[in-house]
Image (cartoon, helix red, strand yellow):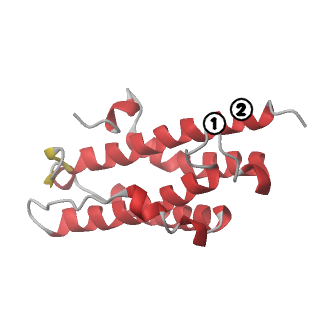
Amino acid sequence: MNPYASYLGTQDPIHVLSTTPSRLEEIAASLGESGVNQRLIPGKWSAREILIHLADCEVAFAFRYRQGLAEDHHVIQPFNQEKWAQCYGAYAGREALRTYSALRQWNLALIRSLTPEQMGRTLNHPERGDHSFRTLIETNAGHDINHLRQLENLQVAAQHKPA
């Protein structure tokens, strides 16, 4: 079972992928520069770190999409997000959001060009087994939903924080 794809429910993954950048912009704007660095729970990521993580993941998905189309039965390379997060001090939230949005538009252009045959290509994830290229897209969209919910919780907490 793919835990991220399960967040989709009946939502269209391409619609989710298309609308996430503007939703992230809204949340980041409402949090402001100081709010993006606040943590809802000690030890958990701040909004800035979530934005950086999303940019990192969009880089990873860009590579996975292209390799999945270029190679038969492509084996997806997993990555350790906690190890990647060790570099997050180098980035600003605004920079991460710009990077994410540009990569997402680039990835959507590719996704929208795919044929049904390409969407059905078989990929292998070492931890999740064989699945279709479409499942990779659903995974990315579900990942968006998961982190949007976290960011929305941070947004609500910031709005209810005493001045």
Q: Hey, which quadrant is residue 80 in on the image?
A: bottom left
The residue at 42%/56% (across/down) is 82
Residue with the most extreme right position: 163
Location of the N terminus by quadrant is top left
The residue at 55%/52% (across/down) is 50
Location of the C terminus by quadrant is top right
Give left or right: position of 25 versus 68: right
Q: Classify mark 2: residues with Cα within 10 Å, few (<14), some (14-19) or many (20+).
A: some
Residue 151 locus on image (x, y percent): 61, 41
Tell me the CA gap for discs 2 and 1.
6 Å
Report which residue position mark 2 lands on: 156
Disc 1 secondary structure class: helix
Disc 2 secondary structure class: helix
Q: Classify mark 1: residues with Cα within 10 Å, few (<14), some (14-19) or many (20+).
A: some
Report which residue position mark 1 lands on: 152
Q: Amino acid at mark 2?
A: Val
